[in-house]
Amino acid sequence: MNRILELSVLISCFLFIGLISLNSSLLILIFPLLAYLLVGLFYQPQKIDLKVNLTITPERVTVNSPVTVRLSITNNGSHLEEVVLEDKVPVDLVRLDGESSAITQLESNSTIEISYSVSGKRGIYHFHGLQAKAYERTGLSLHQELVKTQGSLFILPEFLRLKNVAIRPRKTRVYSGSIPSNQGGSGIEFHSIREYQPGDPVHLINWRASARHRDTLFSNQFQQERLADVWLIVDARKRSEIICRKGSLFEYSIIASAALAQALLNQGNRLGLLIYGGFLDWTFPGYGKLQYERILRALARARPGDSMVFEKLANLPTRMFPMNSQLVVISPLYHEDLPILGSLRARGYQVLGISPDPIAFERGDLDDLTGDVGYRIAQIERSLLLTQLRQAGVYTFNWDVTVPFDRAMALPLSRLLPWLNLWGVRS
Amino acid sequence: MRRVRVLSWVCFFLAITPLTFIYVSQGYWELAFANLIFIIPWGIGFYKDQNNLITVSFIGFILLLAAGAFLEIWIGWLVLSALFIIAAWDLYWFEHRLKSVGEIRKELDLYRSHIVRLVIALLIGLLLSITSAMLKIEINFGIALILSFVVVLGLRQWNLIASKLNR
């Protein structure tokens, strides 16, 4: 109950009963209450006019790194007798040091500083404003205002360095890059021979082939290395979020995505990102460091979501992916996903799967061997699923998340998969 | 903050003890007992930060003062008790505000200015009470009825002011 209302009700009741009963003592008792109330109302606080300068250093950090938030508050209005200043710290951030709220008196044109440090999980955190409550000294009257501030903190996913990811999409772009294309030209690896054309350097002449034909010279052609269109598809369906004591399996998908994005962009590819969960979160394709930053920000805000439409991978919007491009699917994978990934392969996409192992992940929570038989059955089912995917042409890497992604995947991903060579690559 | 808490308790006991003795001395055992009973919700409210318990104790204590007014207890004691219970109530809320924030800046200044404002309010209350105790005005039932209507209308107006201030 409001304190002014409490006093008002008491005063009014005493006055009413005092007048009805003509009891002077009761009427006299009103005055201490009335004086207190009137003093409280007389000195009521003026309008709050604060200028807040918010500094977050650094604004872009990795998980659990400390960040210092500093607010410099200047009172441009009248003297505030008693003011409570409280910075609204986003819920998921943990305060490590300092205080985010303070009570003080603030003279006109004076400045105070509030400083504290926070850390938190992956995500984008917005600091919306400072809540200022100006009280009259007795605390009866209150004037409160939200002083807006602008500041965001990006807690980016942990990113591990992968040196190279060997991919071979069926179609490459015209720009030179690191992916061998099925077209002769300048390069390193031998591709084919063709008839000598004026202007060909002498060292390119294949003397052995030329010797077999009279009056005709042949030149060597090398495999051209080009760039490719690559799409990272992160499975953010609610069912892919398996939570154990170690955390969430989805976080490992994000770590893998960040590492792959860095490696693929470093190779010069044109990379896009689709987070497939409660909704479709697109990061349209691009090159270079700026694109890497965009992808990291998209991964920072990625949350597992539930949607009836996107419950299965069947609604993957394939029209958005360029024909015959490379798709990298990061998902724990389920049996229902098998035909959909197979159909992508049939449409000409090269599909590479990175699958954080949910069985091994959950196994970590079991202390004894009571679940050993169940674990083995689950592992067999999973091996079967991965084998079926490979048979469908979707090469999938099973990642035991107890081993860091860079250590577990650096070697297998850097080798060109033998089956990829079976496919004719055309530019 | 500690000194605010101590002062609040001192004011509370100064409000409750003399009045309890007076009720006992005049044979109103029930009122004296009720007076002491309010220590329990006040104490719990104070240490557990239960504002509702404090409100209940405060209103209950003020109603006991009103009962004393009907039993013709000397008005001087009643007014003093009312002043001290208001002080205790005010200091509870002051401490509550201090506790609710992480950091207190210029604590001594805040404390001093608060006490000065509180003393001013209480002194005005005391002066008005003394003045009104010395004045004698004859009013008949008709005037009392009109004043009562004014009170009802006034109450509504207070509500409007209160809601506006806290918006």
Image (cartoon, coloured by chain):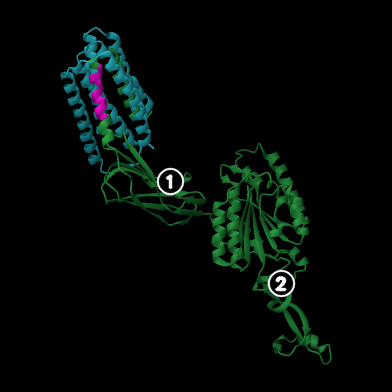
Residue closer to the observer: A220 or A232: A232
Chain bearing tag 2 is: A
Query: Closer to the N terminus: mark 1 or mark 2?
Result: 1
Q: Residue furthest left?
A: B134
Residue A232: quadrant of the picture: bottom right
Which is the main secondary structure of the residues drawn in magenta?
A: helix
Q: Looking at the rendering, in which quadrant would you find the C terminus of chain B?
A: top left
Amino acid type of the residue that numbered disc 2 sits on in the rendered structure: Ser
Residue placed at 22% from the left, 22% from the top?
A: B14
Left/right placement of residue A105 relative to residue B160 reads: left
Would you say residue A34 sits in the magenta stretch? yes
User: Which chain is the one coloured cyan?
Assistant: B
In percent of width and height, residue A373 lies at: 70, 39
Q: Which residue is mark 2?
A: A181
Residue placed at 25% from the left, 14% from the top?
A: B140
Q: Which residue is mark 1?
A: A89
User: Which chain is the one coloured green?
Assistant: A
Q: Residue furthest bottom?
A: A215
Q: Which residues are magenta?
A: A26-36
Sort mark 2 into few (<14), some (14-19) or many (20+) by Cα contacts within 10 Å.
many
Amino acid type of the residue that numbered disc 1 sits on in the rendered structure: Val
Would you say residue A315 sits in the magenta stretch? no
Element type at marker 2?
A: strand
Q: Residue furthest top?
A: B27
